[in-house]
Amino acid sequence: MVAISSSASATRYSVQQAAVPQVKRAAEQAQQAADALQAQARDAWQKVDSAEANARAVDARANQAISTAAQARKSMVSFGGNILAAGSTEKIETPNTKPAPAASSTPTTTPAPGVINTQGQRIGTLINITA
């Protein structure tokens, strides 16, 4: 066994006692840093949850917009088909075989039936102009 002198042991004890406040301070600083990081992590997870909820809401609105656009497209096609069908049922007059003088000819306008949208509202009037 190695013998340690009492003076060496006392010196070692005094060095250890002097280091205790520094070790305590370092442990407190480490605990504060850990607490701060944990608070940042909680905040980050809350932001992630909020971002996911926002993403779901935006996705739902985008799906609704896509559906509305598809319905609008169908309505437009149907509306255009109705206009074409209405135009094809009108009587088309053939021009006279005798041309009229250019100075005396005036365009005539014949109002066509009003245009109705899919809700039954009148949205305009088609006018045919023949020379």
Image: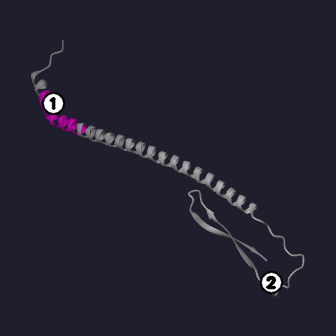
Q: Which residue is mark 1?
A: 16
Q: Quadrant of the N terminus?
A: top left
**Image x and y of residue 85, in percent:** 72, 58
Q: Nearer the viewer, mark 2 or mark 1?
A: 2
Of residues 107 and 1, the one drawn nearer to the viewer in this rendering: 107
Q: Residue furthest bottom?
A: 103
**Label 2: element kind:** loop
Is residue 20 found inside the magenta-colored segment of the image?
Answer: yes
**Image x and y of residue 90, in percent:** 75, 64
- The quadrant holding residue 20 is top left
Q: What residue is shown at x 72% (from left), y 76% (from top)?
A: 109
- The quadrant holding residue 9 is top left
Q: Amino acid at mark 1?
A: Gln
Q: Is residue 12 left or right of residue 86?
A: left
Q: Quadrant of the C terminus?
A: bottom right
Residues shaded magenta: 11-30
Prevailing secondary structure of the magenta residues: helix
Q: What residue is shown at x 61% (from left), y 54% (from top)?
A: 75
Q: Is residue 56 left or right of residue 47?
A: right
Q: What residue is shown at x 83% (from left), y 85% (from top)?
A: 102
**Mark 2 vs mark 1, CA separation in Å:** 118 Å
Up-down: is 103 above or below 22?
below
Q: Amino acid at mark 2?
A: Ser
Q: What residue is shown at x 55% (from left), y 48% (from top)?
A: 67
N-term-proximal mark, 2 vs 1: 1
Q: Which residue is mark 2?
A: 105
Of residues 29 and 58, the one drawn nearer to the viewer in this rendering: 58
**Label 1: element kind:** helix
**Image x and y of residue 94, in percent:** 84, 70
Q: Residue furthest front?
A: 91
**Image x and y of residue 97, in percent:** 90, 76
